[in-house]
Image (cartoon, grey):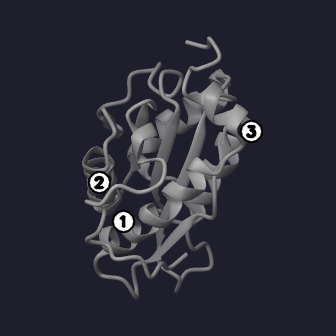
């Protein structure tokens, strides 16, 4: 999804920004060459600028087991590797999630896929993570952002534009789902 939103925006409060501070955000970086980590760091920084109390980045070096269970909203930034696989460094975490099958029904997420459209398996790693999160009960909000490395040398710009368009979709999620996700129904 390419967005026309200004990627340098985000300083002005938008609808729902006051609720950012009520939700626990995590930003997943499943990276092969470092681009997904760059995007994840920029997304987390933007969420903080928009008012989130915390938006921590999970990558293969920083992934305590309970992190997904302890957050309300996830932005998954996932690169593809090889034949549309998840990145090498994320494979162990991916397999552990498949084996452990944690209940992520409380989790809402957005997806940013990084790949190269010259390959038939464009964003294959992102689609695998998307399918896994849904299998574990998480609910994707909005359309994914797919970034083509052959056309976009600065993936963070496209991802930040997508984030600005995605946040209002997060607020439009059915109220009972967002209340449950924010812990406002007693779930903690």
**Foreground: disc 1 or disc 3:** 1
Mark 1: few/some/many CA within 10 Å (<14, 14-19, 20+): many
Callout 1: SS = helix
Q: Along the polypeptide, which appears first: circle 1 or circle 3?
A: 3
Alpha-carbon span between mark 1 and mark 3? 27 Å
Q: Along the polypeptide, which appears first: circle 2 or circle 3?
A: 2
Q: Are marks 1 and 2 in contact (CB under 8 Å)?
A: yes
In the figure, is residue 140 to the left or right of 109? Answer: right
Alpha-carbon span between mark 2 and mark 3? 29 Å
* Up/down of 116 relative to 132, above or below: below
The percent coordinates of residue 25 (x first, y second) are 42, 36
Point 40% across, 88% down: residue: 151
Classify residue 169 by image quadrant. Answer: bottom right
Callout 3: SS = helix
**Foreground: disc 2 or disc 3:** 2
The percent coordinates of residue 118 (x first, y second) are 52, 86
**Residue at numbered disc 3:** 135
Q: Count how many numbered circles sit on residues in the image.
A: 3
Alpha-carbon span between mark 1 and mark 2? 8 Å
**Residue at numbered disc 2:** 46
Classify residue 135 by image quadrant. Answer: top right
Q: Are marks 2 and 3 in contact (CB under 8 Å)?
A: no
Q: Are marks 1 and 3 in contact (CB under 8 Å)?
A: no
**Residue at numbered disc 1:** 160
Point 52% across, 68% down: residue: 145
Q: Name the image quarter holding the N terminus.
A: bottom right
Point 55% across, 12% down: residue: 188
Callout 2: SS = helix
The percent coordinates of residue 106 (x first, y second) are 64, 28
* Up/down of 150 relative to 29, above or below: below
């Amino acid at each position: 999804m390419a967005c026309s939103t200004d990627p340098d925006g985000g300083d002005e409060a938008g609808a729902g920004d006051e609720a950012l501070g009520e939700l626990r955000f995590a930003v997943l970086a499943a990276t092969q060459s470092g681009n997904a980590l760059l995007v994840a760091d920029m997304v987390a920084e933007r969420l903080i600028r928009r008012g989130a109390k915390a938006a921590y980045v999970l990558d293969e070096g920083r992934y305590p087991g309970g992190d997904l269970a302890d957050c309300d909203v996830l932005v998954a930034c996932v690169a593809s590797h090889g034949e549309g696989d998840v990145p090498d460094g994320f494979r162990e975490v991916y397999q552990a999630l498949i084996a452990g099958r944690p209940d992520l029904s409380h989790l809402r997420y957005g997806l940013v896929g990084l790949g190269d459209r010259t390959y038939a398996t464009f964003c294959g790693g992102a689609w695998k993570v998307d399918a896994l999160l849904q299998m574990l009960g998480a609910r994707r909000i909005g359309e994914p952002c797919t970034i083509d490395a052959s056309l976009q040398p600065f993936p963070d710009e496209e991802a930040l534009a997508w984030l600005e368009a995605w946040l209002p979709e997060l607020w439009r999620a059915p109220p009972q789902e967002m209340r449950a996700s924010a812990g406002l129904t007693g779930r903690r």
